[in-house]
Image (cartoon, helix red, strand yellow):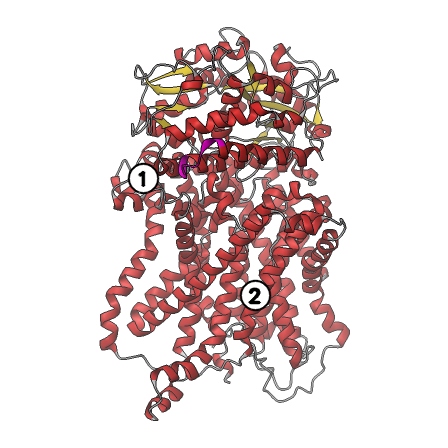
Amino acid sequence: MSGRNAFLFEVAPHHDAGVPAVGHRLSRRHAFLYLLLAVLLSAGVILAPLLVTVGISFSEPGAWSGVLSDAAAWQALGNTLLWWVLVLVVCAVGLGLAWLARNAGPLPGRVLRVVLVLPAVVSPLTTGAIFRLLFDTSHHRGLAAALLGSDTPFLGPGWIWLVLGLAFVWQWAGIAFLVFHEALARLPAGLLRMARAFGVTRRRRIWSVVLPALAGPAALAYVFALVAAARVFDLVLMGAPGSMQALVEGGGLFWWRHNDDLGDAGAAALAVLMSLVVAGAASLALLGLRGRVSWSEPASAPPAARGRRLWPLCAVVSALWLLPFVALLLTSLREPAAAARSGWWSGGPWTLSSYADAFADDGFTAALGTTFLRAFAVVCVVLLAAVPAAYVLAHEHLLPRRAWRPVLLVSVALAALPPQAFAVPLQRWLSPIGTAPALAIVHAALVIPLAVLVLHNAFVQVPAPMLARDRWELFHVVREARPAVVLAGVLAFVLVWNDAVVGLLLNWPSGDHLPLILLEQARHFMSAASPLAAQAVIATAVPVLVVAVTARRLYRGLTRGVRR
Amino acid sequence: MPLSRRALLATVPGVVSGVALAGCAAQPPLRVAVVWSGAELGRFRRVVDAFVERFRRPVSVYSAGDNISALLRGPAQDVIPDVAVIPRLGLLFDPLVRPRVRPREGGHPQPGFWRRLVTPYGSGEELGTWFKLAHKSLVWHRAGEQARPADLATWRPAPGTLAIGAADGWVLSDWFENVLLAYAPEVYDGLFPPAGRGNADWWGVPQVTEALTLLADIWRAAFTPEQGRRALTLQFHDSILDVFTYRTADLVAAPDFALPVIELHGGVNVAGHFRFPAHQGKAPPLVVGGDVAVAMRGGGPDAVTFVDWLTRPREPGERDELTAWVDDGGFLTPFSVPSHPLLRGPAEELNQGANRHYDLSDRLIGPLEGGDGRGLWRVLTELFTEVAAEAAAPARAAAAARDKIVAAAGEGVG
């Protein structure tokens, strides 16, 4: 496998192919110092509280049987399974779109790459708000009902799954698309051509060449969507009316509402149960990650004649994916009272008053600043912890080859773990040090495993200098692997910026985190449509800007990890 | 490691101070947690501005929304506000919250009915001061188009005439409270007596099932399944728009604070209201609600000053932001009479009406405590879904709802 084409999270370990270094190596003790901060944060903030939670769940005899016999808890866990089905839908849609982009040629492919990935940086809270606007019951206000010409309770029983499903797919299919897009571009073209020449049937070609080549990326896309689904929380909180919440909430939201009623042990048991469900679902990804993925050079562009015919379809997909943004933006520009009564297609009066109100609101502007500072602080902590850890893991061969898979597993498991599983003990331990530092630490700990994975993958590709393995090597590696460092930083920033779950779960609703302010606006959802949309646009603009500025590096970081 | 810890400590206090010093002076601002958002929050901030001007003490007002209970109960001491305006009376008596509340000392006297509500049984101390009151037994309609039904027992609104914002659990619980209070005030008194300890066993009496059945009958009559599903997606404000903007319904049961919404979206002088119907010669129900301002123990003397200043009776002729709010509608206090003709009657009833009872669901704590998808709200949402959207038999659905309530109440006691 050529190092150039290595892909994020690839299972097979990359090893330094250079001449064995003769310079001094870090002593084992030193090497562990490099790992210390990352390990301390992950272990202290995630693993230790998780173990305590398991302990609490067994501290009272009836806790497990109580949860297992609670019909409402089972309903919530059943909903979690429905969300899991949506994960599969996201992967399927991502694959379909990637196929479309591949066959349509480079230009539409480039457009789709931007348009489809954009929703992933929007907070789920905003996504919920957008789709609730689009699918409002009244045909005066909801676009879908207006197209049908009569009031339709899309947000009511049954239909609500369609709305939430569309929202979920809209938000995450872009990530799956990106993964599959890369994978399809690197299908073993030579092998396929050979198989065709030998008269192997189409079905057999797909079965023995294409599928094995897609298994790894599929597992990766699945893991990404699963992490999103396991933490589905704010999407439901914002997107579903109060009456529907119990019908669609997954285990996480149920836990948040009922942990007082369940008692300490019962709540802990439910959290452990949820973690087991997620772990079970995540272990499916192992099937795909088991096979060694090999990437060939990107194949040459497919014939253009066929591509042209697909352009209209690409245009439709792009328009559909951009529509929610347009709806949000136009709603935010309408006069608030008019926006409460009618949809954006009914026209003016257009005004910037909702934006003026948002910036005149001290609470909102303070939250904007605080959230930015918090996200920035988390990025610093994450990089400080993850860069040395990834460096040591990549260059000191601390881990034997065989150990890499368990490390990968643990990282994926930590990323997918529902925060409920460690929230309660953590909340008690961290409350003395104050809300703001505690929140930053928790956020950092949650991102670190992911950041280490990303960085490690890039660092192993930086060839070590033959002779000079001096103390500055770390900086040399970081410079060479800059795209991956940027990727890890942006990942941390966006995750913290958009978070509503951790703040709410840890019972620190001090109202200084931006998404929580948005949530407060939504108490009277439709009558606050315009101000809410304006705040959502402002909140979305920041991560979109960050991603736009770093787009080139992000893409390189995602696909290669190193500078060139 | 040392480097990163230093970096952490250097960056993170920036986050804290960024918020804390958002005020204007070196003095840390008085933190006031409220539940309002949007326009109401804006109005409250304008009221508070006068305090900042007069006492030269910065105040930071933030909305905690429905999470205010988590905020007050939570273990993180540093986010507990100095002053809280609590919408749920029950929260004041919560075993975790009550020790954190500073009881009133001095201040203006509160009317007897309202004083008793904030005084724990067997104790002389008042835990909070009433700031805003609400009259929750009104039915609104377009002016001159509807008359009050003769009797709740026979009131069956025709399908499509009634708007209910069933997406908001509190709207449904207000309906239940009005029906229960009209049908069996003794249950209401048993659960939360004016003096003495309440008894959750009252949930098990047959009158509760009967009141739930009556409620289910009304809902069943007022909605076709299609309309029922639609109602489940409408919030309180949407139901008002249905009557006054889209005119797809004729009646909406809503508290006094519906008026500013009606005037914003429907125009002035378009609305009328009548009291929620009485049941067979009994007194008509009067469900009242309200927000209590409390100084928390951590808040210091300024918190007490703030609460006293905020809730003080205004002199006759005194005009400020609060009296303007009262005049515009959407805000009633124990002491002021609004100038709006539609609100003068309800304001008087709040102070001396018969059969006055505080909102039941706002007093519940534990498993029955309301909230989206939980407690009494969830039970009533399921009842509404069954009878209005799925056309189930009202009696059976009501019995199921009662069983859920009794089970949850029993859990709370145990």
Q: What is the secondary structure assignment of the residue under circle 1?
A: loop
Q: Position of residue A272 (x, y in %)?
A: 66, 56
Eye-nearest disc, 1 or 2: 2
Q: Amino acid at mark 1?
A: Arg
Q: What is the secondary structure assignment of the residue under circle 2?
A: helix
* Residue at the image position 63 percent from the left and 36 percent from the top: B407
Picture layout, residue A20 above or below residue A91: below
Query: Which of the image's four quarters has the C terminus of chain B?
Result: top right
Magenta stretch, residue numbers: B388-395
Q: Which residue is mark 1?
A: A141
Position of A511 with respect to A28 (left or right) is: left
Q: Amino acid at mark 2?
A: Ala
Q: Which residue is mark 2?
A: A282
The answer to whether residue B369 is seen in the rendering is: no
Position of B259 with respect to A449 (left or right) is: left
Query: Which of the image's four quarters has the N terminus of chain B?
Result: bottom right
Q: Position of residue A478 (x, y in %)?
A: 58, 71
